[in-house]
Every structure is written in C-alpha cells, then in structure tokens.
C-alpha cells in the first residue's frame, strides 16, 4: 500500500440513516449487555474526515443511552490522514449546509448553538471524541481493543489487493465479536477472512470472528 489514492472529504451527519438505526436498536444494546461488567465501550471512526461521523455516534449514544454515557468509559477515536480536516473536526464548527444535510432538527437544537454564520457543537459532545492523525497505510499505533470500527467509503478508492491488506491490518484491534462498518456500496472480498456479514435494521455489519468461523449468521445479499 505505497500509494494513497486521492480521497474526497465528502461526509455528513448521520450519513446512511439505516446504519444508525441498526446501531440504536440492536448493535449498541448488544454491546451494552456484552460489556456490562467492564462498563467500557471503544469505537473508532477510522476515516473521519471533518468529524461528522464521530460526532453523530456521540450524539446517538448521548440521546439513546444517557445512563451509559454518564456511567461508562466511552472512548470514541476519530482519525484521518489530513491535518487540515482534523483541525476542522476538532473545532466542531459547521456551516448551514453541513447542518441541513441529514442532521435531525432536534439534534441541531439540542447539541449545537449558532455563532455568526456557523453552527458550533456543544462541548459535551465535542469532548466525547478524541481526534488523531493515523495513516492507515502504516503499522497502527497502540490502540485499545475496539467494539466498533467505522471504515466507511474508503475501500472503494483502493485496489482489491490493497483492501485486503488494509482490513487484515485492522483485525488485531477488534474485540471478539466486534463490528466493522463499511459504506453502503462497499463489501469485503472473498480473500478477507474472519468476518461474517449480518443484517440489522436494513444495514450490513461485519462481525469479527477471531476463531475463523465466519460461516454462520445472516447472509445479506451484497
């Protein structure tokens, strides 16, 4: 993976609402039950661009599972290769167009305040997310074991062999039965083992099966 393709920073809040509904109704409740003793949840938005995906996850958790947010250790890591977009993401400042695209009005009213011609996300949500520069072409820095990894709308820019290398490099950071989330037009190739596709509320999630038994579970048509 010597060449990183030019990847646009196109993103929005709550992009692909089916994914967030699947998280709210099934995936997060499952992770809550699974991690109840440890009371810790680790999430990684691995190609976060200007931060909308990571902040959407933080808002969803705060809105749907406030007791978990108050009492648990929740780590949301958001990374990108671009220092410029990471600077924008850390600021939590967005334009009218950013806010109007897919962000529910009740979330705007609850989690943002107007500042001139822009909208600023509240500190409560901004501080839930840690932004770091991580180059996915290189060996990963030390990271906690992840319950949920978002790698959406990135693999489509790579050749098949590069996709395989990238996903295989990520496998060691998954908890057993952790989840990988790809973009709506993306899928794992047959050369990538260790994951099984499951369908939750109309969205596809890939469950990590470290034993190599990825034959069970739902099999959505991809």
Image (tube, rainbow, N blue to C red):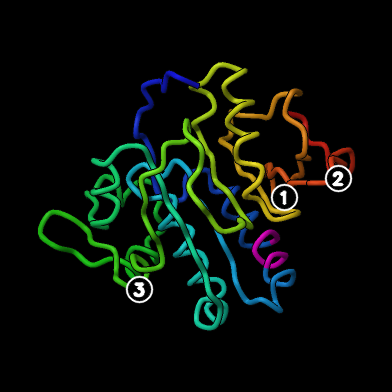
Residue 91, above or below 218? below
Provide residue 205's location: percent of width, then percent of height. 68, 45
Q: Is residue 161 left or right of residue 133?
A: right
N-terminal-most mark, 2 or 3:
3
* Numbered range of the magenta stretch: 26-31
- Tell whether label 1 touches label 3 (CB within 8 Å): no
Residue at 22% x, 58% y is 119
Q: Nearer the viewer, mark 3 or mark 1?
A: 3
Q: Which residue is mark 1?
A: 200
Residue 59, above or below 183? below
The numbered mark at residue 124 is 3
The numbered mark at residue 217 is 2
Residues under labels 2 and 3: Cα distance?
A: 37 Å
| In the foreground, 132 or 219 | 132
Q: Is residue 140 left or right of residue 177?
A: left
Residue 167, above or below 52? above
Residue at 23% x, 57% y is 91
Q: Quadrant of the C terminus?
A: top right
N-terminal-most mark, 1 or 2:
1
Based on the picture, tell me whether residue 104 belongs to the magenta stretch.
no
Provide residue 86's location: percent of width, then percent of height. 29, 47
Mark 2 lies on a secondary structure that is loop
N-terminal-most mark, 3 or 1:
3
């Amino acid at each position: 993976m010597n060449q990183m393709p030019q990847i646009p920073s196109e993103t929005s809040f709550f992009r692909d609402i089916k994914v967030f509904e699947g998280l709210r109704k099934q995936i997060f409740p499952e992770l809550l039950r699974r991690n109840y003793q440890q009371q810790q949840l680790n999430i990684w938005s691995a190609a976060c661009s200007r931060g909308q995906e990571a902040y959407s996850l933080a808002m969803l958790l705060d809105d749907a599972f406030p007791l978990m947010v108050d009492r648990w250790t929740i780590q949301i890591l958001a990374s990108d290769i671009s220092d410029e977009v990471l600077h924008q993401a850390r600021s939590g400042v967005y334009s009218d167009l950013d806010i109007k695209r897919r962000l529910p009005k009740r979330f705007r009213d609850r989690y943002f305040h107007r500042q001139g011609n822009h909208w600023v996300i509240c500190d409560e949500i901004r501080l839930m997310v840690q932004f770091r520069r991580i180059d996915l072409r290189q060996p990963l820095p030390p990271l906690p074991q992840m319950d949920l990894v978002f790698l959406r709308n990135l693999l489509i820019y790579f050749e098949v062999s590069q996709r395989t290398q990238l996903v295989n490099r990520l496998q060691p950071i998954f908890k057993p039965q952790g989840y990988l989330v790809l973009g709506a037009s993306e899928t794992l190739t047959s050369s990538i083992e260790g994951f099984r596709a499951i369908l939750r509320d109309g969205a596809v999630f890939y469950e990590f099966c470290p034993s190599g038994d990825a034959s069970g579970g739902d099999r959505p048509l991809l």
